[in-house]
Image: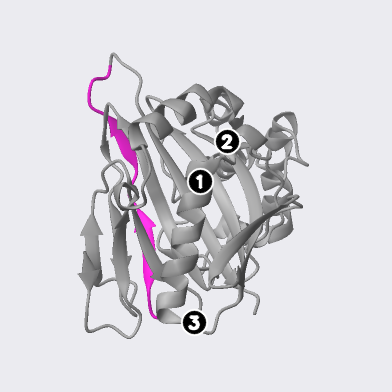
Amino acid sequence: MLLKGLDTPISVVNVLDFDIDFKKMIDKLRNGYSEYEHDAYLTQKNKIEILQAHMSPNELDKIENDVWIKIYKGEIPDCDLPKIFQSVPNDVFLKISSLQPTRMRLISECELIWKGGVWEIHRIPCDSFQQSEATISTNDLDYRLIARKFKELPEYLFDEDLQKILIQVGNKVKEFNNSVRKLSISIHHTLILCIPGQVSSNSPEGIHQDGMDYIVSALVIERNNISGGTSIVYGADAKTPLLNITLHSGQGIFQPDKGTELWHEVTPIALINPNESGYRSTIGFDVLILE
């Protein structure tokens, strides 16, 4: 599916077009879910949102961003929160201490180099991950500007299937910028868990840009016992939908990001059967042009 007539085209890509045994790929990733690590940063952000929801505008104005950042980075422990936020009821702190992780993740990085008419893939070690040019549609503090450290993808999952997808991502970039010779790609394997009574989303910052030249937002691996998780791409006003789609397994959205008029988000997920577990597994790709 290609939306034409835009200066910055959006396309829905499908792994089934990439010569991949997708069922085998799903099984391998499913067996690897135990490798995924709790995204502690998102849990800390959830704590911040709960605190802020129980504070008046006047109280919020008195709190410096440095305090929120320290909570986000885990530098202020839960036991210190009642002393800092004395107007917040005690039951709120009990709720904060009972939060469970809703996002598990792994990260990997590589460079694609164009040689002899083909892409060469070179995996590189991950340092901290920072989206220094990320933007959100509100004036709220964007925590993605802060450097974060995540567990690296095990080598056995940086496999032939993932590399086939990376080559297709590189080819997609060249469709719109044929002069590209070198790309840096950050790869995000995420598992969003449905926890009763908590918000489960892979887009906690709301409507946003990632600050990357191109992105593949949430290539869906599988959806299990969930509703929601709808991907929406907006125009320049960050309000008018250009694409509204609930991606199926194997589908992802390729689009330019930084410096465009495109904004995007994915809606939260919820359990269909409350008596069974539910989750949404995805892989995201952040692409920067190096040459």
Percent across and percent down for residue 44 are 61, 40
Which amino acid, mark 1?
Leu
Q: Position of residue 5 (x, y in %)?
A: 22, 84
Distance of label 1 from label 2 (alpha carbons): 8 Å
The residue tagged 3 is 259
Under mark 3, the amino acid is Gly
Q: Magenta stretch containing residue 278, yes or no?
A: no
Label 1: state its secondary structure.
Answer: helix
- Camera-side residue of 96 and 201: 201
Front residue (pair 102, 287): 287
The residue at the point 41 percent across, 50 percent down is 218
Whichever of labels 2 and 3 marks the residue nearer the N terminus, that label is 2
Q: Which residue is mark 1?
A: 162
The answer to which quarter of the image holds residue 58 is bottom right
51 to 203, vertically: above or below: above
As shown in the figure, which amino acid type bears the numbered disc 2?
Leu
Quadrant containing the C terminus is bottom right
Q: Secondary structure at mark 2?
A: helix
Colour logic? one colour
Residue matched to label 2: 157
- For the magenta stretch, what is the residue range? 259-274
Determine crowd level at label 3: few under 14, some 14-19, many 20+ residues with C-alpha closer than 10 A. Answer: few
Q: For marks 2 and 3, give the CA distance.
A: 32 Å
Q: Is residue 273 magenta?
A: yes
Which mark is in front, 1 or 3?
Answer: 1
| 263 over 65 or under it: above or below | below
Q: Dots 1 and 2: beta carbons under 8 Å? A: yes
